[in-house]
Amino acid sequence: MKIICVGMNYASHNNEMNHAFLKEDDPVIFLKSDVSLLKSGKPFYIPDFSEEIHYETEIVVRINRLGKNIALQFAGRYYDAVTVGIDFTARDLQRRLRNEGKPWEISKAFDNSAVIGQFIPLQSQEEVNNISFRSCINGNCVQQANTNEMIFKVDDIIAYVSRFFTLKMGDLIFTGTPSGVGRVKINDHIEGYIEGKKLLDFYVK
């Protein structure tokens, strides 16, 4: 199982991070591994190699069949469920590595850096393009968006990444985060919602 992540997929987040990004560019893709996965209900422990762990709330899509070089018009056949997840980022480490011109996977793909909630089935292919989601920390809403704001839609992402990676049943796609990212601290209580339904609930330790 692999975790495929999309960076800079919401204009609002790009603006808050001062990223220049054009629709004409290809999607920004990076990977996490199976050791990055953390399921809802289990605590996230802040690692000792970072002083600035940021949460990034995202819609996560679950792949349901084997596929390679998937045509855009058929991409909707390759996923069947979604949830809300948190892509944790060691922002201080990422910033340093970027400034040094080095790969920054260790700031994104460390253990337990990909938290996922309970999956819910999709009723239609079009549904994935109009999902409202939000996250709350200690009862306060910190991120809120709709998938209709994504620069690259889910089908675009699947068609693109399947050119490079064979998609397998159970693979996950983190589709990008909107504005509102920020630092977590010990004892934070993080909850994630899709259309008002709570699917994600865990504590930071």
Image (cartoon, grey):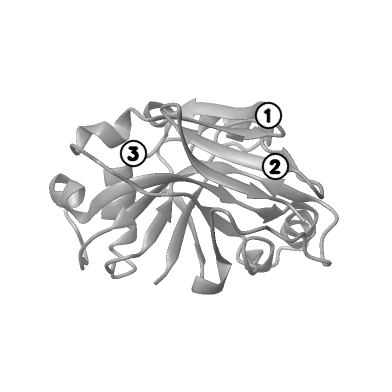
Q: Are marks 2 and 1 in contact (CB under 8 Å)?
A: yes
* Disc 1 element: loop
Q: In which quadrant of the rendered view does residue 114 lie?
A: bottom right
Residue 171 is at least partly visible in this image? yes
What residue sits 68% from the left and 29% below the top?
139
Category of crowding for the residue at label 3, using alpha-carbon neighbours closer than 10 angstroms: few (below 14), some (14–19), many (at least 20): some
Category of crowding for the residue at label 1, using alpha-carbon neighbours closer than 10 angstroms: few (below 14), some (14–19), many (at least 20): few
Percent of width and height locating residue 44: 68, 58
* Disc 2 element: strand
Q: In which quadrant of the rendered view does residue 191 lie?
A: top right
Q: Are marks 1 and 3 in contact (CB under 8 Å)?
A: no
User: Rounded to the nearest whole Å, what is the CA distance between mark 2 and mark 1?
Assistant: 8 Å
What residue sits 14% from the left and 50% below the top?
74
**In the image, which disc is placed on residue 153?**
3
**In the image, which disc is placed on residue 139?**
1
Residue 156 is at least partly visible in this image? no
